[in-house]
Image (cartoon, rainbow, N blue to C red):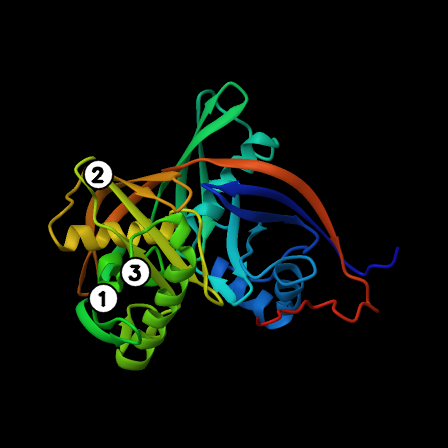
Amino acid sequence: MRSDRVLGTVDFHTAGIGMRLLTSGLGRLPGTTIGEKRRWFQEHLDHLRTGLCLEPRGHRALLIAVMTEPLTPGAQFGLFFIYPGGYYVSCGEGTIGAATVAIETGMVARQGAETPILIDTEAGAVETIVRLDGDRVRQVTLKWTPSFVALPGQVVEVEGAGEVPVDIAVGVGNVFAVVEARHLGLSVRRELAKRIAQRGTAVREAVNAQLQVVVPGLGKTTVDNVLVHELPDAAGVSPNALVWGPGQVDAAPCGSGTCARMALFHHRGLMGVGSTFISRGLLGLDFTGRIAGETTVEAHRAILPEITGTAYLTGFSQFLFDPEDPVRTGYLLEA
């Protein structure tokens, strides 16, 4: 066996989306914030992102949470997030999964039926509450950072769909175009995943070609993520599908996207402080979203969101990097 680097991961899924938590093999990353650590990784170790996320070790839809040492007093660890196309500021599925892994593997000591874990992320420190039933983590609640609507009530010309209303919202640092499925001639159903991906990609292209999106902290930015959703029904259930990356669809309800949608519902007067709704993914698995409070982000009214979901451990892996491997840094075939 020849390898100049061995990386250890714990695999899990959160509401259906398969992910990995990178737990060992990087060493201590330089930086006094998670953003600085992520940027150092991006500048010096981006070949590990592609090597882990792409074939032959990964796939086009793989998200990985990278564990770092904590920075905030009282925090247990830090996280940043990588995927085949780059980096995410935050990830609900990844954070819920990391908290679950930390408790179920003993990285963090459990404290009875509810264990708080403070996690440093690029979007800020995230307070999590891990709820246990015996040895099993049943739920994790994230008390997250502000989310808001950046550009409401826009209309773009979408190929194959005509004029489509769209809102640009920020969910805990990630930027989303949010569009109702009916405006694309769709409903949010598993068997329509391919059409959702096609129409969502067309919306993304239209938004980036026709709108100028400026977000506090980011400045002028592109929009990489499109949420195709249906408004909550009488029972408060709202199906949604995230189109992201090279053009795939997230099977899970999308944690930061759930926060962005709550900010939109709050903007429209559909939700207030204390309100909850069910964000449902294509597999019929749910996150519960709750508006815990109100705040502002520069000139934008914002909410303080919470989401609750469940993750399941699926395996442990060690990944090797042979110096002579011709596809050491990974590859992606565009089909």
Task: Determine which residue is flagged by label 2.
Answer: 236
Near-viewer residue (99 or 28): 99
Closer to the eye: label 3 or 2: 2
Q: Residues within 10 Å of mark 3 (few under 14, many from 20)?
A: many
Task: Determine which residue is flagged by label 1.
Answer: 166
Q: Is residue 3 above or below residue 165?
A: above
Q: Does residue 146 show up?
A: no
**Place of residue 38 in the rendered image (x, y in percent of width and height, measured from the top left):** 53, 63
Q: Is residue 41 left or right of residue 226?
A: right
Near-viewer residue (26 or 288): 288
**Place of residue 282 in the rendered image (x, y in percent of width and height, measured from the top left):** 39, 46
Secondary structure beneath label 2: loop
Q: Residue at x 65, y 59 (%)?
A: 52
Q: Please, what is the three-letter code of the amino acid marked with disc 1?
A: Val
- The extreme bottom residue here reads 209
The residues bearing labels 3 and 2 have C-alpha atoms spaced at a distance of 22 Å
Q: Please, what is the three-letter code of the amino acid marked with disc 3?
A: Val
Which of the 4 image quadrants contains residue 323? bottom right
Mark 2 or mark 1, earlier in chain: 1
Closer to the eye: label 1 or 3: 1
